[in-house]
Image (tube, rainbow, N blue to C red):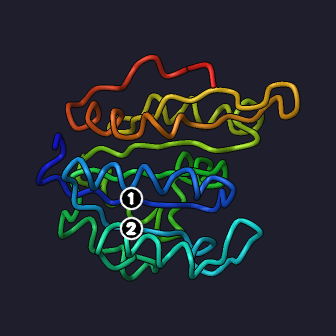
Amino acid sequence: MRLQGTRVGFALTGSHCCLEDVMPQVRKLVAEGAEVFPVISTVVDVTDTRFGPAAGWKNKLREITGNPIIATMVDAEPVGPQKLFDLVVVAPCTGNTLARLANGITDTPVLMAVKAQLRNQRPVVLAISTNDGLGLNAKNIGLLLNTRNIYMVPFGQDNPAGKATSLIARWDLITETVIAALQGKQLQPVLVAY
């Protein structure tokens, strides 16, 4: 149990097609001894999609973590002053969230938790899932790769022939990235074959 006693904020944003792949990673963190607190964006909180109803994802998060969900700006605000988490993971981290974070925009519960975590000079792990990672969001990824206390789950092109600018994190490397980030290290290599 490599994360015994570690408090992790696990934030999910609206890359709904990835939620099913991310849930086992939440379980893995819990199995490693972390106390995991779910944080969800408004889109995840209220949007039913072909990938599942919002209520279903929230029920699964509560079942896996045993903790209430942070789903509003008001609920996320104490993350900073109360130093609630040792680390925050954002998985999946959409291009929209990347762009807002890179430009200092804090208008969702997830971004509020991240801002609060960075304010406390504590680590944030981003697991990207964006169709424009090698397009409009490339500059934001570059900026965030060079931002203190931000660590990236290794990522690569998931479908170079069909979606040439799409990038996605290796979900199975979330726990290893968390362990490295808690030591102030970026898991390498960052760019991987998907």
Q: Are marks 2 and 1 in contact (CB under 8 Å)?
A: yes
Residue at 71% across / 32% down in the picture? 158
Picture quadrant where residue 75 is located: bottom left
Nearest the viewer among 173 and 88 is 173
Residue furthest left as drawn: 5
The N terminus lies in which quarter of the figure?
top left
Q: Which residue is mark 1?
A: 10
Amino acid on which disc 1 is placed: Phe
Q: Secondary structure at mark 1?
A: strand
> On the rendered structure, is 127 left or right of 27?
right
Establish if 134 lies above or below 109.
Answer: above
Picture quadrant where residue 129 is located: top right
> On the rendered structure, is 111 left or right of 18?
left
Nearest the viewer among 181 and 148 is 181
Q: Which residue is mark 2?
A: 38
Q: Secondary structure at mark 2?
A: strand
Nearest the viewer among 15 and 184 is 15
Residue 111 drawn at (x, y percent): 47, 61
Nearest the viewer among 119 and 13 is 13
Amino acid on which disc 2 is placed: Pro
Residue at 87% across / 25% down in the picture? 161
